[in-house]
Image (spheres, rainbow, N blue to C red):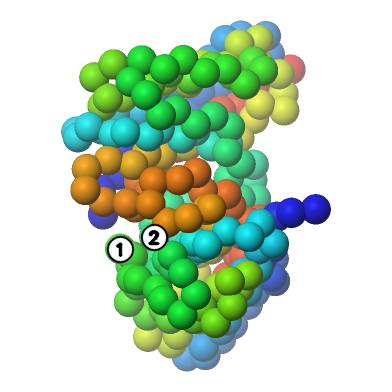
């Protein structure tokens, strides 16, 4: 099945730093979702985006729906240790109603 | 509290045995989904159901079976025909089928011995 290209694969940062990650698709998407997964747990929905150019925040997290509709970005400001986990992008595109997932970005935050 | 529950959290089975994973939701969602997660990979769709008594195959349905007799419940059976069943299994639901936000349960880790 189709997968999204998500980068970077992993990030190791110091507490307090800002983080950026992105997701790209070869086809147009009309919904982007960002999830966070803690080890051994299910993904938790962070932000949902529905319109090209849309910029949405959830606390220290900000996500954007790219204007080309083929990409999305997630930024985390002033990272803290509990931000550790795997972040997944996901989206709906084309004629299918199946949610397609990126391969994830592993974030490690050193206190 | 509304949410999705999966049980058990950890499951061990011997090769050649069928095993059923439970998924229950009290969100009044119409649609439910089963995904498989392997290390370093995104989630892959096994089966989904948009309404009671109806379900469709996802991308990797071979070796799996499901039923949807109640709106709240969507159990997944991993059969002995599944060649590599050891994985983390995630159940999700959404308010309806189509392009809606999906919400996930805590997952079941299945290990075949």
Whole-percent x, y for residue B24 in the image: 65, 68
Say which quarter of the image contains residue B93: bottom right
- Whether labels 2 and 1 share one chain: yes
Give above or below for A44 relative to A42.
above
Q: Is residue B61 left or right of residue B36?
A: left
* Identity of the residue drawn at 41% across and 76% down: B54
Q: Is residue B32 left or right of residue B60?
A: right
Q: CA distance from mark 2 to mark 1?
A: 6 Å
Residue B29 seen in the figure: yes
Q: Which mark is residue A40?
A: none
Q: Is residue B95 left or right of residue A99?
A: right
Whole-percent x, y for residue B85 in the image: 46, 73
Task: Give the chain letter at badge 1.
Answer: B
- Quadrant showing the C terminus of chain B: bottom right
Contact (Cβ within 8 Å) of mark 2 with mark 1: yes
Near mark 1 (Cα within 10 A), the count class, few <14, some 14-19 or many ≥20, is few
Q: What is the residue that sits farthest to the right in this orientation?
A: B1
Q: Which mark is residue B59?
A: 1
Relative depth, front residue between A33 and B16: A33
Among the two numbered marks 2 and 1 on one chain, the one whose residue lies closer to the N terminus: 2
Whole-percent x, y for residue B58 in the image: 33, 65
């Amino acid at each position: 099945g189709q997968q999204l290209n998500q980068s970077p694969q992993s990030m190791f940062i110091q507490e307090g730093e800002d983080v950026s990650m992105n997701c790209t698709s070869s086809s147009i998407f009309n919904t982007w979702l960002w999830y966070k997964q803690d080890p051994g747990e299910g993904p938790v929905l962070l932000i949902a985006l529905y319109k090209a150019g849309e910029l949405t925040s959830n606390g220290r997290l900000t996500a954007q729906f790219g204007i080309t509709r083929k990409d999305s970005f997630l930024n985390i400001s002033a990272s803290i240790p509990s931000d550790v986990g795997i972040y997944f992008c996901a989206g709906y595109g084309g004629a299918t109603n199946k949610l397609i997932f990126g391969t994830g970005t592993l974030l490690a935050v050193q206190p | 509290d509304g949410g999705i529950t999966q049980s058990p959290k950890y499951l061990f089975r011997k090769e050649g045995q069928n095993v059923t994973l439970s998924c229950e939701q009290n969100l009044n969602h119409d649609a439910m989904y089963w995904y498989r997660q392997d290390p370093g990979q995104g989630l892959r769709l096994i089966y989904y159901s948009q309404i009671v008594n109806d379900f469709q195959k996802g991308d990797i349905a071979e070796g799996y079976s499901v039923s949807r007799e109640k709106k709240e419940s969507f159990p997944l059976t991993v059969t002995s025909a599944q060649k590599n069943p050891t994985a983390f299994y995630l159940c999700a639901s959404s308010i309806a089928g189509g392009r809606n936000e999906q919400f996930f349960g805590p997952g079941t880790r299945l290990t075949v011995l």
